[in-house]
Amino acid sequence: MTTSTFITEDGTSFSDSLMPSMVVISGGTACNLMVNILQNITTDVSYVLGLSDNGGSTSEILRVLGGPGIGDIRSRLVRLIKAKKEDHEKAAIKNLLSYRLPVEGNETSIKNEWLEVVEGTHRLWRNISSEIKGTIRGFLVHFQTEILRTAHKKFDFRNGSIGNFFLTGARLFCGSLESAIFLFAAITGISELTKVIPIINTNHSVAIAAELDNGTIITGQCEISHPSQEPQNSPWVADNTYENLICHDSPTETFNSINTVSRNNLIFDKSKVDILNRRIHRIYYINEYGQEIFPSVNSKVLRSLSMKSALIYSIGSLYTSIMPCLILRGVGKAIAESTTLKRKILILNGSNDRETDQFTALDFITSIVDGCNSSLKFDGFWPKEYPAKKYITHLIYLDNSFVKVNVLEIEKLGIECVRVKGTFQDGQPVFTEESLDHVLSDLIR
């Protein structure tokens, strides 16, 4: 029997039987800061991301073309592109697929810049070979064709992500988001061992809602996490009720009153949002009528949970990034009963956000455990519940964290607490790459 040897990005070699592997449950932005660390530990990583993103240029794609929210998927794929200094083509591809059209400016000039990209005359195409240029352009042209088919909806190219446009064009052409992800990874040279997996395998729109502890319902990821600060102008009448539900601006409207959709989610600032006046009781998925639905989890997620050696709950938005990946049928059971997951690590945020105001570390743990246990009812296990230690074995937290960590109470649950030296950035406590790399390497390798 032969044994293969793998070399991670930091030069460490492992045999195929000893190489560490991970499942990372995360959102798009916060976890991107950790990607280099994780890839240096091992390239055998499955990144699991939700599809309910409805902000930024994704919101405009949803309004005009529909489909799943691919903003977080694109963000992770771009981050995984390893462009060395001497590899000018790889760097150019990364620059192209991470490029955004201007936020401000004349509408015609922004649209003309997009047309330069589609026509292949834009400066971003420099250093990209003709065969790769032709492949990427082909899907951008297909995206543009679909936009022209729906010209009456007047697509807004402000802040448009070229990577989002490419993924959408590939998805529409192939009829599959997973095929589009495969094409993106193949073109950009992302390691074959590294997978980016949507939590739901679908070609349709996905929306979530939050029920607060006073019964108030907030619909749409953007409204829950970072509602737009842009004043509402004249609304755009939508042809599809689901589009209204996903992109609607007011969290206090009832489902029956949702009948317009604006472009306000196109531009937002996460740093300038008010906190929720009540705690979130639960997150759930909704259909085009605002009714609760129960989508099936992507089978690749369950397969990864049954094969990898470590699970990481990433830093980021608890209720709009992590929880939508945990509440689906089979996820809680797969995590709790996995025979391969030796470490189940929660990396705690250094501070609270709009969704988790005044939360302690124990509140984060309780929310994750409750979310995982709630998924058991779909498997006929309800009201059986697993203890916290079946879902989380380690908590990594900052020594300068703004989130209170009661180590004694947490360790009573069977969860080991690991303190890491942090620093401050823009007045907020954050992990340093060196300290987080050190502790994760010790736990996972």
Image (cartoon, rainbow, N blue to C red):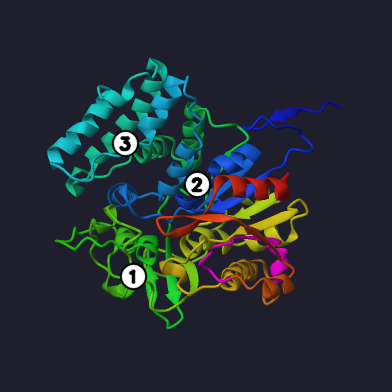
Among all residues in the image, which is located at the extreme top?
A: 130
Decide which of 206, 97 is in the foreground and name it: 97
Mark 3 or 2: in front is 2
Mark 1 or 3: in front is 1
Residue at 74% over, 60% down: 337
Q: Any mark on residue 274, and which?
A: 1
- Segment colored magenta: 385-404
Is the residue marked by circle 2 packed among few (<14), some (14-19), or many (20+) residues within 10 Å?
some
Q: Is residue 70 visible?
A: no
Residue 186 x/y as whole percent: 51, 29
Q: Any mark on residue 143, and which?
A: 3
Place residue 355 in its image quadrant: bottom left
User: What secondary structure is found at the residue carrying circle 1?
Assistant: loop
How far apart marks 3 and 2 lie (CA) works out to 30 Å
Most prominent secondary structure in the magenta stretch?
loop
How far apart marks 2 and 1 lie (CA) works out to 25 Å
